[in-house]
Image: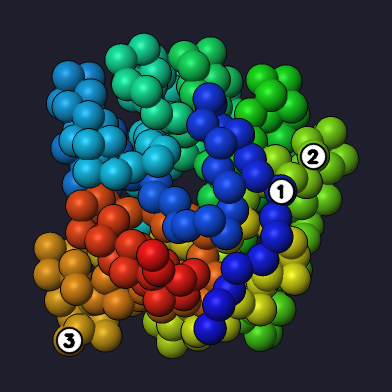
Amino acid sequence: MNTTRKLASLTIGSREFVWGERTYLMGVINVSPESFWNGKYGDEDAALERGRTLVEEGADVLDIGGQSTRPGYDEVPPQEEAERVAPVIERLVSELDVPVGVDTYKASVAKAALEAGAHLLNDIWGFRRESAMAALAVEYDVPAVIMHNQRDREFHDVIDDVRAGLTASIAIAEEAGLARERLIIDPGFGFGWKPEQNLEMVRRLAELRDLGLPLLIATSRKSTIGMVLDDAPPEERLHGTSASMALAIANGADMIRVHDMAEMRDVARVADAIVRGWP
């Protein structure tokens, strides 16, 4: 199924993202020691080296997180989180030619990251936890990824729930003055859903295209994939991640958030060749 549709292009940093042309790759750099996977880049030099590797392997944008948001995560104090991410972002922005985003839902952390040069906000609560996040995106003139988070909410229909949550987040953004075309939407795979609901989300992802915004999905090495694979640990979920990402692209994903850049670059290239056409 060809999922190409016309969306306005988006500039992140100095790079233009032309939606529908290909699938874009967001590389994860966790500077949180409590992260479930790949959380070993708290040292600035290590994070910079990781960033270089991700860019060499095909990353279009980097996403820096200072607090794990795995199921059952503990809150990190905002000042500590800011101290983790801001110096790393400053180094990455100054030394690499790639847009750099921050993965946080806390306005004070986001402000520190933006002051350090961040080009993108990625909010797992979609501005619904701290609406000041939207105002910061306007103040610093940066786009944002807004995610639907199903944690602590009633379940109805997976896509209806996601659509309702994202619609509320879009409204918060627009009320703050952040233009709709400055948004990327994320349905929130793994955030408050049962495994079968996560799988249904990927299967029905194309139904969210009616929101008229680019779709990001983040399935990389998450617990649902491990459960499908007989409780495989995170280090044994690469092939399952590949399958989920290929199907997400077939169902309309415009960007995938990944830990394993070289492998997912190849997954995206082949999926794009099938879905969008080749050569």
Looking at the image, the residue that sits furthest to the front is: 279
Q: Nearer the viewer, mark 1 or mark 3?
A: 1
Of the residues shown, which amino acid type is indicated by label 3? Asp
Q: Could you tell me residue 37's position as x and y percent?
A: 22, 52
Give the crowd class for mark 2: few <14, some 14-19, many >=20 residues within 10 Å.
few
Question: Element under label 2?
Answer: loop
Give the crowd class for mark 1: few <14, some 14-19, many >=20 residues within 10 Å.
some
Q: Image point 78% across, 57% down: which residue? A: 168
Q: Between 243 and 274, which is closer to the camera in this rendering?
A: 274
Of the residues shown, which amino acid type is indicated by label 2? Ala
Question: Element under label 3?
Answer: loop
Q: Image point 43% across, 22% down: which residue? A: 82
Q: Image point 66% across, 79% down: which residue? A: 207
Evaluate whether residue 196 shows in this view: yes
Q: Image point 39% across, 28% down: which residue? A: 98
Please tell me the numbered disc located at residue 230.
3
Question: Element under label 1?
Answer: loop
- Mark toward the start of the polypeptide (1 vs 3): 1
Q: Nearer the viewer, mark 2 or mark 1?
A: 1
Disc 1 to disc 3: CB gap under 8 Å? no
Q: Is residue 169 above or below residue 12?
A: below
Measured Cα–Cα span from mark 2 to mark 1? 12 Å
Circle 2 is placed at which residue position?
Answer: 179
Disc 3 to disc 2: CB gap under 8 Å? no
